[in-house]
Image (cartoon, grey):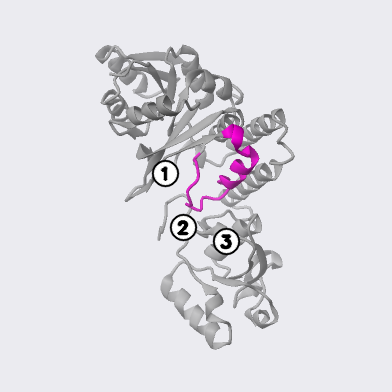
Amino acid sequence: MGSDLISVIVPVYNAELFLERCLQSILRQSYENLEIILVNDGSTDLSGKICDWYADLDKRVKVIHKDNKGLVSARKTGINAALGKYTGFVDSDDYIEPDFYRHLHEELVKTGADFVNAGIIYEFVDKQRIVIPEERCILFENTDRVGFIRKNDVIVCTHEYVVPPAMWSKLFNAEFIRKCYFSVADEAQEEDLAAFYKCILECRIFAEVPYAEYHYLVRSDSISNQYTYVSMLRRFIGYNSIYNILKEYGYHELLGDLLQKRMTMRMLDYANEANIPGLEAVTYIYPSERELDGKRIVLYGAGKVGRSYYNQLCLSQYCRIAAWVDKKYNNKPQGACSGVEILHQLEFDLLIVAVKDYELAEEIAKELGDSGIDNKKIQWKEPIHWLKGEGYQ
């Protein structure tokens, strides 16, 4: 058993289907010096009773029942009640491997970091995707924080490695997270991103461990995937929190464009879900956006993949779209798409075949090559479905 107390905060709202698995995984931790704070945020199912049952089962479990005020409020309630030197968060529908907190604690003690991040096991319906960081320690007094945030920007989920903004894959110095998390508005969505920006702008030392031991359940019905008027309002409150945090450190002008891109992407998502004509969200993602740095791009294809790529790359900081072409361009929205006959009039570095199927991409590439397009400039990569994981068909 470690000598430092770790407070594990679990916000709970109507999680009866997943809660016992979550709590069992925390109770089985090889690092045993834990206080497990369950914040029942006004659940209307059996979650509250399950919390109370585990409090009777193990003296390390504490339960706080409160009216429903949302995730941010529940976490703040847990932070205020926590007595530990370090603080971690686990979502009630997720679960962790037995050595999760032991590995994070060892790294915090070794590096003296303000917080440490671990890898994630994304649990989809039919598969897993595991992301493992390299072990590293960053001294931010010697690091360009704005540059770090830009390099780590996750406006589009290209599945290149970034430090995820999620609070639950990390362990924090308790006083540090108290200072950072209370900058987030209670009503905010995008709350983890707001807290993450505050952590990066405030911290002295940040570390990562080369283990993936947090199981994140990817659910299409989660709060983050809801597109209602209320959820959009909460997202704008979240963006306002982020803006205020950036302004506090004088970075609102330097990083305001990233915030604007995120807001644009969410509005496209909302328009797509609300079936607003002429607008469509990014559903499929080009998987290696950063490899396009400095290139003039032609997109071939204006189906769902092509439209997604177009919306994605129009907002990219890495490349410029020279043209978007399709054989049936007259049927495509907004007049942005042109016919394939203009290809021989263009100067471009790369032509991306924006279709989902490999066989179709091969047919298009052959046709383009036969028409005189340099085959070395033609590229197809399997699209990523941004909600359902890499290579989703």
Q: Is residue 83 left or right of residue 282?
A: left
Q: Earlier in the sequence, mark 1 or mark 2?
A: 1
- Assign the N terminus to one quadrant of the image: top left
Most frequent secondary structure within the magenta stretch = loop
Mark 1 residue type:
Glu
Q: Which residue shows up at 63% across the image and 66% down it?
A: 295
Residue 15, numbered circle: none
Q: Which residues are magenta?
A: 140-164
Above or below residue 306? Residue 243 is above
Residue 326 coordinates in the image, percent (x, y): 60, 74
Mark 3, other Cα within 10 Å: few <14 / some 14–19 / many ≥20: many
Q: In this figure, which residue is indicated by the disc labeled 1?
A: 134
Q: Which residue is mark 3?
A: 309
Across and down, in percent, residue 99 comes to 30, 31
Q: Check disc 1: other Cα within 10 Å, few if <14, some if 14-19, many if 20+.
A: few
Q: Give the structural element (helix, strand or loop) at label 3.
A: helix
Which quadrant of the structure image shows residue 97?
Answer: top left
Q: Secondary structure at mark 2?
A: strand
Left or right of 143? Residue 252 is right
- As shown in the figure, which amino acid type bears the numbered disc 3? Tyr
- The kind of residue tagged 2 is Ile
Label 3 or label 2, whichever comes before in sequence order: 3
Q: Nearer the viewer, residue 175 or 299?
A: 175
Q: Which residue is mark 2?
A: 384
